[in-house]
Amino acid sequence: MDIGDKTPMPLPLKLYITPVGAAGGVVIKAGEVIARIHMYKIATLGSGNPRNFTWNIISNNSVVMLTGGCTVDSRNVTVDLPDFPGSAEIPLGVYCSSEQKLSFYLSGATTDSSRQVFANTAPDATKASGVGVTLMRNGKILATGENVSLGTVNKSKVPLGLSATYGQTGNKVSAGTVQSVIGVTFIYE
């Protein structure tokens, strides 16, 4: 292409649309702007003749864009445990826009070699000693990194069936605050 040539040339760009958020779909209507590209061009000759260009990417047809993923019904769950040695259910579930085989695993700082007792991260001034937190599912204590299958999950909410309880880390337990941060990561199988 020569400098004076006014032949239109395609711009080598690709637009990737990545859905974010909930299971289900997003409706894009015909004529709706789905993206806007702003470009600032400066030529390499003379003063550069700077120019601003804006392209609107407009949907030609109405379409439902399926997100296809799964959604956890709550991103941050706080569970208040009753006095030692009590336990409490964890209200956490997942659902998917289409059938998905799912599993999950736990992560967080633990205090034992079996990776089952999560560390008490409460402030030192109020922290209980000799105790951490364990998570159970169907009466079984779960370890960090242990895959737990949920089977096939669809549009109906599947509860994780988790409960939290105290996990003793020493011979003597002293009163105080017990607090742990535990991550739950989902895996598409």
Image (cartoon, helix red, strand yellow):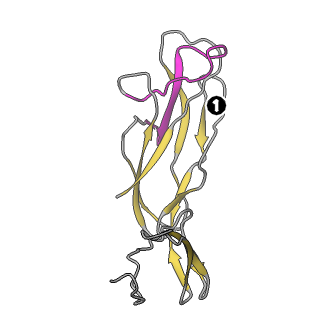
- Is residue 161 shown above or below 43? above
Quarter occupied by the N terminus: bottom left
Give the crowd class for mark 1: few <14, some 14-19, many >=20 residues within 10 Å. some
Relative side of 2 to 170, left or right:
left
Q: Which residue is mark 1?
A: 81
Of residues 154 and 16, which is closer to you in this image? 16
Of residues 136 and 48, which is closer to you in this image? 48
Residue placed farthest to the top in the image? 172
Residue placed farthest to the front in the image? 46
- Is residue 16 shown above or below 71? below
Residue at 61% in and 85% down? 29
The reply to whether the magenta stretch includes residue 121 is yes
Quarter occupied by the C terminus: bottom left
Helix, strand or loop under label 1: loop
Q: For the stretch drawn in magenta, what is the main secondary structure?
A: loop
Q: Locate residue 31, reporting x and y percent.
A: 61, 87
Q: Which residues are magenta?
A: 115-141
Q: Locate residue 132, reporting x and y percent.
A: 52, 23
Q: Locate residue 7, reporting x and y percent.
A: 40, 90
Residue at 42% in and 68% down? 44
The reply to whether the magenta stretch includes residue 119 is yes
Q: Locate residue 170, reporting x and y percent.
A: 48, 13
Quarter assignment of residue 58: bottom right
Residue at 51% in and 77% down? 65
